[in-house]
Amino acid sequence: MPPDLWALYALMLESRLFEEAVASLWHDGLISGEMHLGTGEEAIVAGVVAHLREGDAMALDHRGTAALLMRGVDPALILRELLGHPDGLCGGMGGHMHLFSKEHLAASSGIVGAEGPAAVGFALSAQVLRPGAIAVAFFGEGAMNQGMLMESLNLASAWNLPVVFVCKDDGWAITTHSARVTGGDLTDRARGLGVQAAEVDGRDVSAVWEACRPAIERARSGGGPAFLRARCVHLEGHFLGFQLLRMVREPLREMPRIAVPLTGAFLHPGGAGLRERLAGLRTVLEAVLATLRDPRRDPANDPVRRARAALHLEEARLEELEAQVKEALNDVLAATLVEAPA
């Protein structure tokens, strides 16, 4: 049975529009602190979550909003939480990186790699109390270098636990290319621990859905854990307001903020020698040029656009679906921003 692309697109669109609204509120100063959006990960999350059923659990990283929305958590509760209101999902105390829903067996954490132990705990509980249920862990490729995630893969393999590890690989560890700080191949690393592993284009929701199906079915039937490496592009960088992207998008405003102190440091009579200063300047310029060629700027790397393009022959149906999703989100925004206590 092929995936229902219409249903998957609806999940992805709701997530994208919700996070765009969150970004707007953040820029307006209504949401404090850093903001890590999942824009660019929608196909991975939708392709996996679409297979989940009641009793399944999710261990999420600091980009957990999309998974919670797609799992059915009330968007108004999430939004109130991000705004810091006491009637938010976690009483206004968790922010966007620590979202929990006991009803949905979902927990997120800002600790890199913590999704591994949480998912293994969920899976052990399922194995004992809810046979046929599974757990899913969502994390970035940088988490694969954390000891507790490696230990979780090992324990899941040794105990044959019903857990699927989903690695959302965008190739970046904040501002460092992941390949520069990672030895070997991540997929081979999982296989080396006895975990069945596969790779998929994380920008293609149908491909993710197809790749995830046998892994989840095997886990449900007692076949043990699986590892899915899905490559994607974080459209907003590591966090909202990513400096290099701001520089590219608004050069007239952002360049002076960098050029003036950089020039001052370069011409300062003390400090490092000319060779070291030139090397530092070259590093900065290379980062700027790399951003100009960055895949985040390529529409082909946007999973929501790709899913929509696959449905474009039914434009009227598309417009109706999009109007319904936008209307529902606008209702949530209006009710939340008006009714939430100060």
Image (cartoon, grey):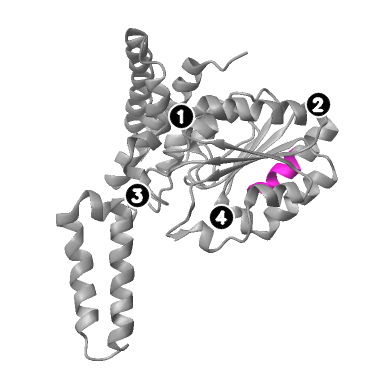
- In the rendered view of the protein, which quadrant contains the C terminus? top left
Q: Disc 3 versus disc 1: distance between alpha carbons? A: 32 Å
Q: Tell me whether the residue at label 3 lies in contact with that at label 2, contact meaning CB atoms closer than 8 angstroms.
A: no
> Would residue 114 appear left or right of 328 to someone viewing this image?
right
- Identified by mark 3, the residue type is Asp
Dot 3: what SS? Answer: loop
Quick one: label 1 or label 4, which is nearer the N terminus? Answer: 1
Of residues 301 and 173, which is closer to you in this image? 301
- Check the image and name the residue furthest to the bottom: 270
Above or below 39: residue 74: above
Q: Position of residue 214 (x, y in %)?
A: 70, 27
User: For residue 54, which quarter of the picture?
Assistant: top right
Numbered circle sitting on residue 75 = 1
Dot 1: what SS? Answer: helix
Location of mark 4 (residue): 142
- Identified by mark 1, the residue type is Pro
156 inside magenta stretch: no
Quick one: label 3 or label 1, which is nearer the N terminus? Answer: 1
Q: Disc 2 versus disc 1: distance between alpha carbons? A: 33 Å
Location of mark 3 (residue): 294
* Of labels 3 and 2, the one closer to you: 3
Q: Disc 3 versus disc 4: distance between alpha carbons? A: 19 Å
Q: Position of residue 135 (x, y in %)?
A: 70, 35
Quick one: label 2 or label 1, which is nearer the N terminus? Answer: 1
- Identified by mark 4, the residue type is Gly
Q: Disc 3 versus disc 2: distance between alpha carbons? A: 42 Å
Q: Tell me whether the residue at label 2 lies in contact with that at label 4, contact meaning CB atoms closer than 8 angstroms.
A: no
- In the rendered view of the protein, which quadrant contains the N terminus? top right
Location of mark 2 (residue): 221
> Would residue 73 appear left or right of 106 to someone viewing this image?
left
- Identified by mark 2, the residue type is Ser
Q: Magenta residues, as a range?
A: 114-122
